[in-house]
Image: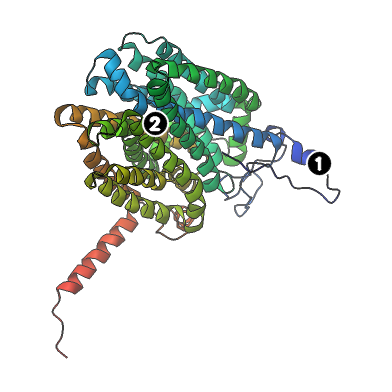
Amino acid sequence: MAMPSPAYETFPTGRLTNQHLHLDYDSEKPPVSPTGTGCLSNDDSADSVAEPERWNSTRINAYRYYVTNISFLIMGMNDGCLGALLPYIETYYSIDYTTVSTLFVVPLAGYIIAALVNNWIHYTVGQRGAAFIGPITRLLAYLPMALHPSFPVLPCVMMFTGFGNGVQDSAYNAWIGNMHHANELLGFLHGSYGVGATISPLIASAMITEANLQWYTFFYIMIGLTFIEFIIGTTAFWGATGDEYKRRMHSQQGKSRVTTLMAVKEPVTWIVAIFLLGYVAAEVSLGGWIVTFMLRVRHAKPFLAGLTVTLFWLGLTLGRVVLGFVTERIGEKLAITIYLALSILLELLYWLVPDFVASVIFVMLLGFFLGPLFPAAIVAATKLLPTDYHISALGFASAVGGGGAAIGPFAVGAIAQQTGVQVLQPIVLGILAFIIAVWTLLPGGFRKGGLEMAREQNLKPGGDLREIWSWIRMKAARAGRPRALP
């Protein structure tokens, strides 16, 4: 994906000064508040307001941002390949839907462990640690997968992918979610994830159906890419140590250190976590079972079935990039509500219209409107929560979201074993209806700037839902009144 080139401010001489080229971890100034509310040092007034960090404010920042996109590309390839490989793994090991679905479940353990240690990792080894741990733990999974051992080994090693993804997911989302134009930047970041999820099933399907290779040969590619990520990632974040992270948090929030337990006491943390749980469950259930659904229910040819899931991930990628700019202009609360309403309509059409071509169109559009939900939810959380809560809160929310990636596809597989894979559509439809109700619990109304206002006024969650319910009751009461005769 083409990214904008770094644009640096210049002085009248037209040359960059040392101030613009310094590494951000060497600055003597207190870091600015990523939320835009200002960074208060011990001597600052409460009214101090500073601009959020910009992705290209320094060369090292720009380099790091590019590296995070590469990491998310590989994470997307990791999540996207399973849907295409699932029918072939099932055949290779002669196992049923429920058994093969365990490949989705075990990574949840890795995500949970990542949520518990994310804050400790940042305070101990900083972002450098996240850039190191992510690819190393994924390699611990890909190497055994490439050796195609007996099936029980596969779910066990997949736990390492969950841990590595969980560490990098929260670290990079929290960092970029605090930047200027966070919606657009997270749109590109998660768009990179979508690119990976788009190309991996296409590559995997082509390797198996066209080149007549075994399913496990795809992981040779994953090993090579992850090793490259390890080299460039640790290089980019080498200066982002634990001491630097502690210094920045100390400058922004004082001496107190926020723990994961403190973050999960915030209602907003739970609302965003449950929302991501449902969203990821719907996304990965679709991505994981579309190929099987198209083969068994729509009776598509194997390569065309693989192409369908590729178009789903392509739509998701385009939605994250394109709709990120729309979300920035109308606000996260309203944007996600609209996107979810359209997704529910498209999912209903995908379920009820059996035509193959129509199914492909509905799937791609469904991916398009589902795409921006995750990054927009991250931005909403950063606007509602204090800065020093972001790593712990987003780490917890990402772990719960990772639970959706495990529970959703496994539930589909377990139920499909009894009734058939056509259960995919009603399950996803029910999940989407549930999370649109959860989303309305966030405070701040549906106007742009409402989330910031909710944080400033310390508004409690659920107020918008109560107002909607009161409005419905009022309209119902008026409709039931007899009209006066003229």
* Picture residue at 55% right of the left edge, 27% below the top: 123
- How packed mark 1 is, by other alpha carbons closer than 10 Å (few <14, some 14-19, many 20 or more), is few
- How packed mark 2 is, by other alpha carbons closer than 10 Å (few <14, some 14-19, many 20 or more), is many
**Depth check, front residue: 413 or 437:** 413
Q: Name the image quarter holding the N terminus.
A: top right
320 relative to 405, above or below: below
Q: Secondary structure at mark 1?
A: loop
Instruction: Say which amino acid is labelled 2.
Output: Ala
* Picture residue at 21% right of the left edge, 27% below the top: 414
Asked which quadrant contains residue 408, the reply is top left
Residue 427 horizontal side relative to residue 327, left or right: left
Residue 441 appearing in the image: no
Asked which quadrant contains residue 267, the reply is top left
The answer for how far apart the CA atoms under marks 1 and 2 are is 42 Å
Q: Residue at label 2? A: 399
Seen from this angle, which residue lies furthest right? 13
Q: Earlier in the sequence, mark 1 or mark 2?
A: 1
At which x and y percent is residue 340?
35, 50
Q: Name the image quarter holding the C terminus.
A: bottom left
Instruction: Say which amino acid is labelled 1.
Output: Thr
Q: Residue at label 1? A: 17
